[in-house]
Image (cartoon, grey):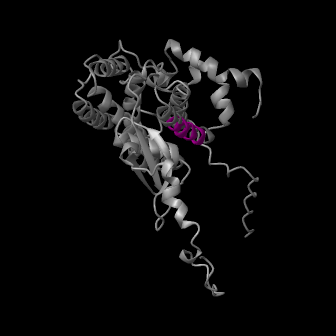
Amino acid sequence: MTPAEPPPAPVAGTTAVAPRLVGDEATAALMLGDDALILSHRLAEWTGHAPALEEDVALANISLDLLGQARTLFSLVGDEDELAYLRGERDFRNVQLVEQPNGDFAHTIARQLYFSLAQEIRYTAVVGTDGCPTPIRELAAKAVKETAYHRDHATEWTLRLGDGTDESHARMRRGLEVMWRHTGELFAAVPGLPLDDAALRENWLTALEAVLGEATLPLPQGPDADAWTAGGGREGIHTEPFGFLLAEMQHLHRSHPGATW
Amino acid sequence: MTTPWPLWEVFVRSRRGLSHTHAGSLHAPDAEMALRNARDLYTRRGEGVSLWVVPAESITASSPDEKDPFFEPAADKAYRHPTFYAIPDGVKHL
């Protein structure tokens, strides 16, 4: 019996290459990674524009957490830069919620509340489901702590805006209603992740109703998942603002391929 | 902003056994948000295990004008300082 070859020594400054996923499992990593990357980019747009310096830093921190998640997930599928900078609009599999423009601060918080809550619930389920790919479960176990903080941040702001002044209440309510039509897609089944998505959505609704109730805000009543409403992001169909987001995000890399800091 | 948020002073305990140390200050609408802002501003790189936030207006500070009466007398009385003892070799941190 020949001894197994020792693994090649990792190159200084790089981490060991994670096992590559293929098929549905790669699609799952891509979908979750695209969600994280696109929301990260949207939140980064607040940098220098948030209502207060402290909030500027808070949003940037959340953005960087999500960027880290996206990098890990992309590294399971292929080259991070190629996936982030060289794919076309129809190749992105993120839910349409995360690509929605920031709007005013309340719109951003509404989007953040819907998404963070969903992401935390899904990551928690992924960690506890043996049938999910091991590298994604490892990522989820680490990321769920970050996501819990993101949910907490969005919850605290929802309470303060909802239960604040007439103006803040009206704006928060409007943000929740504008973003609502993009929430039907949040718990669409992700191939490669054998989860009970309908049950997860029930958990999400229960948690959401608790937050909104405390914030004196009504749960939006509009349709969220009917055929007429939005929700083709997982198939690569995106809303109009997404093309502009991609152009800005990819412009530098496409103009100067391989550019480094 | 029409109504600026109140100022909070932030204290961070870097690890168990050490006392909380003043790290800086920030603005926040209330104590809960101040704690979260402090987490984002002062402990993102593993600097702490515990945070305190205190409304800056609750701190009573000595006045710079009173610096002399407050602190000057301590400087010129050498007998108040433990400088007349030989430090044993075994004592490393004094």
Q: Residue at x 46, y 65 (%)?
A: B16
Magenta highlight: main SS = helix
Residue A145, image x and y in percent? 44, 47
Residue A114, image x and y in percent? 37, 30
A131, B37: nearer the viewer: B37
Let me know if residue A68 is in the magenta part. yes
Q: Which residues are magenta?
A: A61-72
* Residue A194 visible to an observer of this rendering: no
Reply above or below: A241 against A184: above
A46, A151: nearer the viewer: A46
Q: How many marks?
A: 0
* In the image: residue A161, left or right of residue A26: left
Reply above or below: B26 against A134: above
* Residue A59 visible to an observer of this rendering: yes
B41, A176: nearer the viewer: B41
Let me know if residue B73 is in the magenta part. no
Q: Residue at x 32, y 37 (%)?
A: A200
From the image, which quarter does the C terminus of chain B lie in? Answer: bottom right
Q: Residue at x 60, y 37 (%)?
A: A74
* In the image: residue A56, left or right of residue A230: right
In the picture, residue A177 is in which quadrant?
top left
* In the image: residue A149, left or right of residue B92: left
A111, A47: nearer the viewer: A47
In the picture, residue A208 is in which quadrant?
top left
Residue A42, image x and y in percent? 52, 25
Residue A226, image x and y in percent? 32, 17
Reply above or below: B93 against A215: below
From the image, which quarter does the N terminus of chain B lie in? Answer: top left
* In the image: residue A241, left or right of residue A149: right
